[in-house]
Structures are given as structure tokens and as C-alpha cells.
């Protein structure tokens, strides 16, 4: 399974991060431990939404969409 996830910073609620992983718990723990330099200054993070995919190609396509301008608008409104 591939998981496309949206994180929200609890320190700055307007900060969001979108990514993809095969292990959600480990990935969230990594973000909150400060191991990812890009997101460490906005921690702690909480899992806002995730979508599970069996097809990796579709998962990557959905992540790419969520990172686009229309995808970010969709995520803010619907997810």
C-alpha cells in the first residue's frame, strides 16, 4: 500500500505538507522528531488526512495533483 497524506502543523495551523509513504506512523514520527529539515521548523505535525492506494502509479499521480495549485485548493476545501 502507498499512502498519500496531508499533515497540518499544530504550531502554525495554516502550514500544510503533502507527501507519500508506505509507513504512515514511522513517517509522522520522523517529521515530529525533526529529522526532516524542510519541515522541522513547523513541528509538531498532526495527520490531517490520508488516502491509501494499492496502485503506486495512481498514488504518485494523486500526490502530484495535491501539490498543484488546484489540488491545494481541493485539499483545503474537501480534505
Image: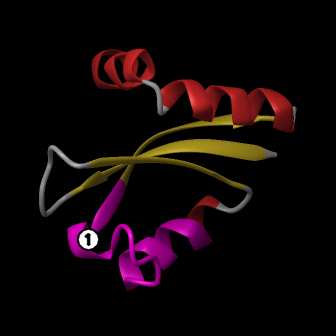
Q: Which residue is at 82% across, 46% downward?
A: 1
Q: Is residue 72 visible from the viewing direction of this image?
A: yes
Whether 32 is drawn above or below 9: the answer is below
User: Percent x, y for residue 57?
Assistant: 84, 32
User: Percent x, y for residue 10?
Assistant: 18, 59
Q: Which residue is at 76% across, 45% downward?
A: 2
Q: Is residue 54 visible from the viewing direction of this image?
A: no
Residue in the foreground of this view, choosing between 32 and 62? 62
Q: Secondary structure at mark 1?
A: loop
Which residue is under mark 1? Answer: 43
Q: Which quadrant would the C terminus be assigned to in this image? A: top left
Whether 15 is drawn above or below 30: the answer is above
Q: Which residue is at 22% across, 49% downward?
A: 15
| Magenta stretch encompasses residue 51 | no
Judge from the rendering whether residue 15 lies leftward or rightward of residue 16; answer left or right. left
User: Percent x, y for residue 70?
Assistant: 40, 15
| Magenta stretch encompasses residue 32 | yes
Q: Magenta segment, which residues?
A: 26-46
Amino acid at each position: 500500500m502507498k499512502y498519500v497524506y496531508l499533515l497540518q502543523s499544530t504550531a502554525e495551523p495554516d502550514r500544510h505538507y503533502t507527501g507519500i509513504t508506505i509507513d504512515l506512523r514511522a513517517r509522522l514520527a520522523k517529521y515530529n522528531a525533526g529529522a526532516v529539515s524542510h519541515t522541522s521548523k513547523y513541528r509538531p505535525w498532526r495527520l490531517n488526512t490520508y488516502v491509501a492506494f494499492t496502485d503506486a502509479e495512481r498514488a504518485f499521480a494523486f500526490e502530484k495533483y495535491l501539490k498543484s495549485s488546484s489540488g491545494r485548493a481541493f485539499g483545503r476545501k474537501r480534505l
